[in-house]
Image: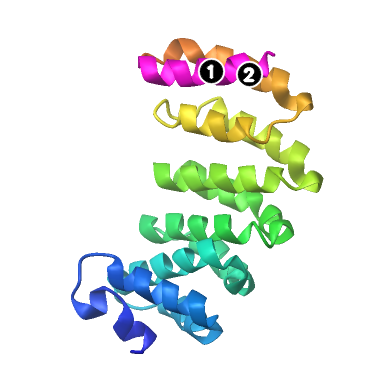
Amino acid sequence: MMSVLSSLANSQGRRDEEPNKELARHIVDKNDTTAVEELVQLLQHKDKNIQSDSIKVLYEVGVEKPELLAPYIKVFVQLLHIKNNRLVWGAMAALNAVATVKAEEVYQNLSLILDAANKGSVIAKDHAVKIMVQLAKVPAYTSDTLTLLIDQLKDAPLNQLPSYVELTATVVTSEHKTELSRVLQQRLPEVEQESKCKRLEKVLKKLQK
């Protein structure tokens, strides 16, 4: 196996993601904590392409084996404040993965995550919503997180609104159903695209049963 740096797509002059995916698979298969540590260090590399490859491999690893990323929550949170959008949403994706095994630590950083999402790209917002949905599955955080989630829906971009609503509906409790329905009814008139309207109406119908 080549070194971690030489295994990255940009180190090989590749423009596709296959080398990064292959490296992630290798790390997961071997439970390679040393490689994960090297990738975390490469997030500080002077070449932004190497940084991007490194975060890509890390969040791919997180999807399959989130516990390998668990020691680096602080690193991912720190990345949320930099100007490189690729690293910001990559860090969000990593935190989304880690939330499945370290919900408490991710929850403690939720205000920073939401702040970064509100300032960041649509992809960053997507991951922030997924993080909140993940946290809402934990009884200790359900109520607070659902309140924040529903609040996000009030001004979510119209393109994203149906998917955010559908995700929220998977974790909504009876306590929050009325508020979610109210926000949905409030936003529906803004949605012009028929397919998006139908998706929202479908959720609304289920909520009102």
Provide the residue designation for mark 2. 206
Specify whether 15 is left or right of 30: left
Q: Residue at x 46, y 80 (%)?
A: 41
For the C terminus, the quadrant is: top right
Image vertical order of residue 177 relative to residue 62, above or below: above
Is residue 109 rendered to the left or right of residue 90? right
Disc 1 designates what residue?
202
> Callout 2 environment at 10 Å: few (<14), some (14 to 19), or many (20+)?
few
Residue 195 image-quadrant placement: top left
Q: Is residue 198 magenta?
A: yes
Element marked by disc 2:
helix
Counting labels gives: 2
Please state the horizontal and vertical placement of residue 51, each as a whole percent of the image.
36, 71
**Magenta includes 171?**
no
The amino acid at mark 2 is: Lys
In the rendered image, is residue 121 in sight?
A: no
> Magenta span covers which residues?
193-209
Q: Residue at x 63, y 18 (%)?
A: 206
Residue type marked 1: Lys
Local SS, label 1: helix
Q: Which class describes the residues within 10 Å of circle 1: few (<14), some (14-19), or many (20+)?
A: few
